[in-house]
Image (cartoon, rainbow, N blue to C red):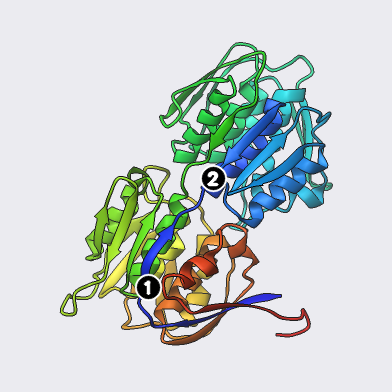
Amino acid sequence: MEKLYITGGKPLSGVIETGGMKNAADPIFFATFLVGDVCTIENVPDADDIRNACEILTSLGAVIAYKGDNKYQIDTRYVKQANISNELASKLRSSYYLLGAGLGRFGEVETGFPGGCDFGARPIDQHVKGFRALGAAVTEDMNACRIRCKAENGLNGSSIYLDVPSVGATINIMLAACKANGTTVIENAAREPHIVDVASFLNSCGADINGAGTPTIKINGVSELYGSKYAVIPDMIEAGTYLIAAAATKGEVKVNNVIPKHMESLTAKLEEMGVNVEEGDDYITIHAPAPDAPPMHSVRVKTAFYPGFPTDMHPQIAVLLCLANGESKLTESVWANRFQYVPELMRMGAKLNVSGSDLFVTGVPELKPANVRAVDLRAGAAMVIAALSANGTTVVDDIHHILRGYEHIVEKLNAVGADIKLVKLPDTMG
């Protein structure tokens, strides 16, 4: 059992280096399964989700070597099948990318249901719709918690319209379609930066994908793929988390290794709240407010698919709204059950009210230390931010959620003036 003990109330000050994007690295790792050759992936975040992806690929026969400096060599030449246990599949949500990769390589795949954060039902109906349009038969065994996809006559290109611009479905269909016969067109595709990153990796391996980052993606099937060397893009969610932490503590932090264009929806909202933001070519700095500066003021935020405000920044911005003057409204339009963190934040003195998909926030002068839980990955990051802003010591439990997605978060924050201790306790202790 691990907990974080965070003594807050201190402005953060210094420089933080952003790591590689977890949401890009995960599907790229599974994409190496489709490639069937030796790939070198650089700028990979040191996070539990990556270790779980490595465990799944290794169980299938892949040979993975860590080369230091966040670089992995993945050899999938001798993998013979795509079948993983329920236990392995449940370790992370992105295990479902094995479906598209397995179909594309072998025409057949079977896995357990994917795991990850619990935001209520996470249907994969758009994935299934795409696989079937390409010619695969898909069977979902709810009792055994298994999914099987098989294309007895091979995969053939098709036109697929997604009912919602699902990131997971867009990537999975791209994976399956790379080696399908003919051309596949995905309409209403997701546009997130990690969609572009996965497509760029596949193209570096010989795929023919056009339009990634737009609502229409065209994939011309190829007969063979080959290995390549590729660097994962910076993690805009990690960077955004540290920017909000700086604002919440009234600190001054420069976040390096970012793509500012990816973060415009966040930085625009921070500036609207009265936060001092400076952007460079590959960095963003939050400047400490002047002593006589007015407090941050309330705003309205609505999450949306990219390029809108990301749902993965919802809990973190909620903390900042708690510290802003006035009444704010945060509307969640992507994940219906994103509000599970609300009771934890209220333990710290936040004034929050959930009504349907809306969160109404009444700003308070300060948050108070308390014992709280990380109910999921981004909610856990929000608890860390709240604790950093509160005078006194906050204890954060269930931190495995945080560690699976944030690279060296304790070390990075302590390096800019935070006081965070990761404490390991016997499982029998509270």
Q: Quadrant of the N terminus?
A: bottom right
Quarter of the image where one finds residue 120? bottom right
Identify residue type, mark 2. Answer: Asn
Q: Residue at x 83, y 48 (%)?
A: 143
Q: Determine whether the residue tagged by mark 1 lies in a helix, strand or loop.
A: loop
Q: Most extreme residue toward the bottom, as rendered?
A: 392
Query: CA gap, disc 1 to disc 2?
Result: 25 Å
Identify the disc placed on residue 246. Answer: none
Residue 168 shown left or right of residue 278 in the figure: right
Residue at the (31%, 48%) spot, across then down: 264
Amino acid residing under circle 1: Leu
Q: Earlier in the sequence, mark 1 or mark 2?
A: 1
Under tag 2, what secondary structure? loop
Which label sits on residue 12?
1
Q: Position of residue 322 (x, y in %)?
A: 36, 74
User: Residue at image x 69%, y 24%?
Assistant: 104
**How many marks can you see?**
2
Q: Is residue 127 visible?
A: yes
Question: Please, which residue is most extreme toward the left here?
Answer: 292
Q: Label 2 belongs to which residue? A: 43
Image location of residue 128, percent across then percent down = 66, 33
Q: Residues within 10 Å of mark 1 (few under 14, many from 20)?
A: many
> Is 18 in front, or is 121?
18
Image quadrant occupied by the C terminus: bottom right
Residue placed most toward the observer, 168 or 243: 243
